[in-house]
């Protein structure tokens, strides 16, 4: 039973770290990042003190401290959120403000809202009210996110601890051993070893009624990826309860670009082939569960399809739900301007509210080597620049969550760390490059920024917690959609914007989300073409050709869509003109790629 048609995805490390405590009692789903157990422990201590709950520190001397910290924090957030939910439903002395807000924020089309209006609620009939609320109201889910690539090996006294103590494995164990009845969102692609480890935990299997206490959500970029990962897990007896499709580039945080596959066609394939996906994976699951002598559901278990990335208007929200038959739409970046929901320090929030297109860019600062959406002028980048000017580039690397590079050491180190950059620059000096090539290589080394610290510092600053180890530099990772939201606002106002009863976007030049994504992809392709000049390989040329063909196919899809649904969007005519213009641009790119092929063949 879901109250809302939107969810709040994970954002950074700190920005949604306690969002469930702020919104779950209103029936809104949200997601906590499990990257930083040090931050989670600091947050647990703070909330224990605030609510006068006994606190016992889980130190790094404890066996399996990372998993224990994660379990303890999730259990605390669950308990506190449930108490707020019960207080909201308490009508002994009339309707609480929270209860009024719960129903006020529901869309006008909500059947629950209509039921509420028809039921006599109030202090004069508390029993009827309580029965109605207990039967009809549900808390939002407290989801967790694990980036599968962040699975660093851990050591004690230089001795490897073993695979189950790797970061992602420990995070999974922390969630599995928590009291949550919820979902884990796996992002950043497939990690076979981590997926295999899920088999160890009973809560991920369906019980005799088909109920799964700990569900799996996969963040995917396309249908093929969903099918591959879904089958892989089904062979282990594990069911994927939701496939969460995210735009490759029109999103916040790390940007995992597709080969030119666009959001609209991807969603259409999920809609049109959902039955095939469900049937194939159910068949594999049934065999695996039978082999394990477990309960075998006679019919497929429920599967949700959701999407996120670049959504900014009620019109887009409704179109995604209705045309692509989605179960939920993710709203991330706009919530960075809602202090009631996300944890962003005041200074950074002010910068976000003033950001325009030119302030939001796809950077190469991430130590993971994946393009990363960032905000110009963020304080972590300013801190990095000061270190470079001092002749001491790189971060002290106090947390080491991305310390996975073994180019110079047996234990992994982070490419944003001072240690790595010192060693890499020393090696660079011995390569006898031209001044121009040396500077180019130097810039690529020192541009890496300490994301695992920078993406968590906002919470420490917001709540006045100690930043001695981390410093005060904040990294922020909004999507390009941030340019069109400029008002720091409240939760009620944002939900009204999502459901179309108000409008928070003052600008009149915001492009439709599909056009914006296409714009970003064409800019990305242009950069890739430029990068190949002078040293083009057949493989690169094949990639560029495939990328261009896929974008052309996407444009054809949108042209057909707009022709078939002439009143789908208010700016239909502008979208048609934009698609024609992009078709011309891609034609020019095709000529450039052909010229590169000719040069390469000579």
Image (spheres, helix red, strand yellow):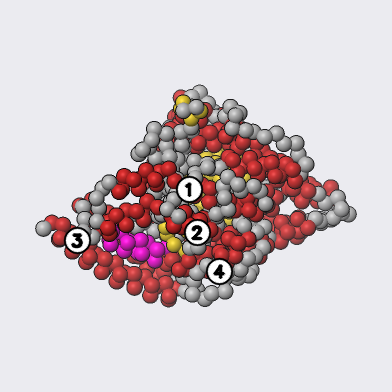
Which of the marked residues, 2 or 1, is nearer the chain's N terminus? 2
Which of the marked residues, 1 or 3, is nearer the chain's N terminus? 1
Q: Work out whether 535 lies above or below 186.
A: below
Residue sitting nearer the eye, 428 or 456: 428
Q: Residue at x 54, y 36 (%)?
A: 171
Residue 526 is a magenta residue = yes
Label 1: how many Cα within 10 Å (few below 14, some 14–19, many 20+): many
Which picture quadrant has residue 328?
A: bottom right
In the rendered image, the quadrant that contains the C terminus is bottom left
Q: Nearer the viewer, mark 1 or mark 3?
A: 1
Query: Which residue is the site of mark 3?
Result: 596
What percent of the width, then of the height, locates residue 70?
A: 60, 37
Which of the marked residues, 2 or 4, is nearer the chain's N terminus? 4
Q: Relative to 99, is 527 on the left or the right?
A: left
Q: Which residues are magenta?
A: 517-531
Q: Secondary structure at mark 3?
A: helix
Q: Work out whether 489 lies above or below 2.
A: below
Query: Which residue is the site of mark 1?
Result: 395
Say if residue 520 shows up in the picture: yes
Query: Which residue is the site of mark 4?
Result: 354
Q: Estimate the spatial distance between the alpha carbons at disc 1 and disc 4, rounded to whole Å.
A: 28 Å
């Amino acid at each position: 039973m879901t109250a809302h048609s939107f969810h709040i995805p994970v954002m950074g490390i700190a920005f949604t770290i306690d969002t469930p405590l702020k919104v779950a009692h209103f029936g809104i789903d949200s997601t906590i990042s499990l990257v930083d157990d040090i931050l989670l422990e600091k947050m647990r201590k703070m909330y224990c003190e605030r609510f006068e709950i006994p606190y016992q520190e889980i130190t790094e001397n404890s066996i399996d401290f990372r998993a224990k910290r994660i379990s303890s924090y999730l259990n605390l957030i669950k308990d506190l959120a449930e108490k707020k939910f019960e207080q909201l439903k308490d009508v002994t002395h009339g309707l609480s403000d929270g209860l009024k807000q719960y129903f006020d924020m529901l869309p006008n089309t909500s059947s629950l809202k209509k039921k509420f209006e028809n039921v006599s609620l109030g202090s004069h009939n508390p029993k009827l009210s309580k029965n109605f609320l207990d039967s009809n109201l549900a808390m939002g889910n407290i989801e967790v996110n694990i980036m599968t690539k962040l699975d660093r090996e851990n050591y004690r006294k230089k001795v490897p601890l073993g695979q189950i103590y790797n970061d992602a494995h420990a995070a999974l164990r922390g969630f599995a051993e928590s009291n949550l009845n919820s979902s884990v969102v796996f992002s950043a692609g497939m990690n076979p070893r981590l997926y295999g480890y899920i088999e160890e935990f009973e809560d991920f299997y369906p019980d005799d009624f088909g109920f799964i206490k700990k569900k799996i959500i996969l963040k995917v970029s396309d249908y093929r990826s969903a099918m591959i990962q879904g089958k892989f897990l089904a062979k282990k007896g594990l069911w994927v309860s939701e496939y969460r499709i995210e735009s490759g580039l029109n999103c916040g945080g790390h940007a995992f670009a597709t080969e030119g596959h666009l959001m609209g066609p991807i969603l259409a394939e999920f809609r049109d082939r959902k039955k095939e996906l469900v049937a194939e994976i159910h068949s594999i699951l049934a065999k695996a569960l039978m082999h394990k002598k477990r309960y075998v559901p006679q019919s497929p278990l429920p599967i949700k399809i959701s999407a996120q990335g670049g959504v900014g208007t009620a019109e887009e929200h409704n179109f995604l739900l209705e045309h692509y038959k989605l179960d939920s739409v993710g709203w991330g970046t706009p919530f960075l301007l809602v202090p009631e929901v996300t944890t962003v320090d005041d200074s950074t929030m002010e910068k976000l509210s003033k950001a325009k297109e030119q302030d939001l860019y796809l950077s190469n600062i991430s130590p993971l080597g994946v393009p990363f959406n960032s905000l110009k002028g963020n304080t972590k980048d300013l801190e990095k620049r000061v270190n470079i000017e001092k002749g001491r580039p790189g971060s002290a690397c106090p947390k080491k969550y991305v310390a996975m590079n073994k180019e110079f050491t047996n234990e992994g180190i982070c490419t944003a760390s001072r240690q790595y950059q010192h060693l890499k620059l020393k090696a660079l000096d011995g390569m006898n490059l031209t001044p121009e090539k040396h500077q180019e290589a130097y810039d690529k080394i020192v541009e890496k920024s300490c994301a695992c610290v920078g993406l968590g510092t906002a919470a420490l600053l917001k709540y006045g917690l100690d930043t001695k180890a981390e410093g005060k530099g904040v990294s922020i990772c909004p999507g390009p959609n941030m340019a069109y939201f400029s008002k720091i606002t409240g939760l009620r106002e944002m939900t009204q914007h999502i459901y179309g009863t108000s409008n928070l976007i003052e600008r009149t030049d915001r492009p439709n989300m599909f056009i914006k994504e296409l714009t970003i992809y064409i800019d990305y392709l242009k950069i890739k073409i430029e990068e190949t000049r002078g040293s083009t390989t057949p493989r690169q040329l094949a990639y560029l050709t495939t990328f261009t063909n896929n974008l052309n196919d996407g444009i054809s899809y949108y042209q057909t869509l707009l022709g078939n649904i002439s009143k789908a969007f208010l700016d239909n005519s502008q979208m048609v003109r934009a698609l024609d213009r992009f078709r011309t641009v891609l034609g020019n790119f095709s000529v450039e790629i052909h010229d590169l092929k000719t040069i390469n063949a000579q």
